Image (cartoon, rainbow, N blue to C red):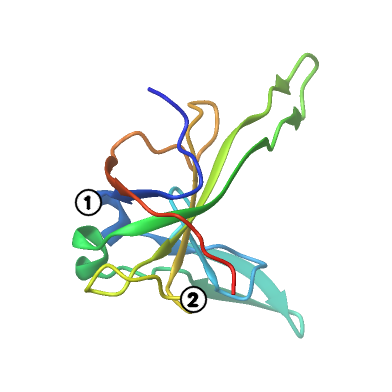
């Protein structure tokens, strides 16, 4: 499978069941993020629900706005090295297929060694940015 590039228009049924990414102000929806996290607030354990499921998202079109090699590093054990992977950010298009600057943003990796790996997508078109 070839790496996605900026301007590729994609769809995926998996986009219907995404979660907000912790520590990003709930702006980025991510494949493989946990359903909930626990943290301490004033000495008490608080559970934050990160689910952001939306069935309409599974039928929507998204345009790749950023694609790069990154995310690699070292794990916790000896020899735990993870090479960089192909990271993708895509914005949800309007229903008529036009770009929506405020559209939902999804993030995933095209590399199998990351938990936010996604291979179940389809390229359905191409868009080109025009600067004004």
Q: Identify which residue is drawn at 47% across, 69% down.
A: 50
Q: What crowding class fits label 1: few (fewer than 14 Cα within 10 Å), some (14-19), or many (20 or more)?
A: some
Q: Identify which residue is drawn at 51% across, 47% down.
A: 6
Q: In which quarter of the image is residue 77?
A: top right
Q: In this view, does 129 lie above or below 122?
A: below
Residue 17 visible? The answer is no
Rendered location of residue 5, percent (x, y): 49, 40
Identify residue for label 1: 13
Left or right side of 87 for 91:
left
Q: Which label sits on residue 101?
A: 2
Determine the secondary structure under disc 1. helix
In the displayed orientation, state which residue is furthest to the top: 79
Rendered location of residue 89, percent (x, y): 52, 53
Residue 6 visible? The answer is yes
Q: In this view, does 42 lie above or below 132?
A: below
Q: Earlier in the sequence, mark 1 or mark 2?
A: 1
Label 1 to label 2: alpha-carbon separation? 22 Å
């Amino acid at each position: 499978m070839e790496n996605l590039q900026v301007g590729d228009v994609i769809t995926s049924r998996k986009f219907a069941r995404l979660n907000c990414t912790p520590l990003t102000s709930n702006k980025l929806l991510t494949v493989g993020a946990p359903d909930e996290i626990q943290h301490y607030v004033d000495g008490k354990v608080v559970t934050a629900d990160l689910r952001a499921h939306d069935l309409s998202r599974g039928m929507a079109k998204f345009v790749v706005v950023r694609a790069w090699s990154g995310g690699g590093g070292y794990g916790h054990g000896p020899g735990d090295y993870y090479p960089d992977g192909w990271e993708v950010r895509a914005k949800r298009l309007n229903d008529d297929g036009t770009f929506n600057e405020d559209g939902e943003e999804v993030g995933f990796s095209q590399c199998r060694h990351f938990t936010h790996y996604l291979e179940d997508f389809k390229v359905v078109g191409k868009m080109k940015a025009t600067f004004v």
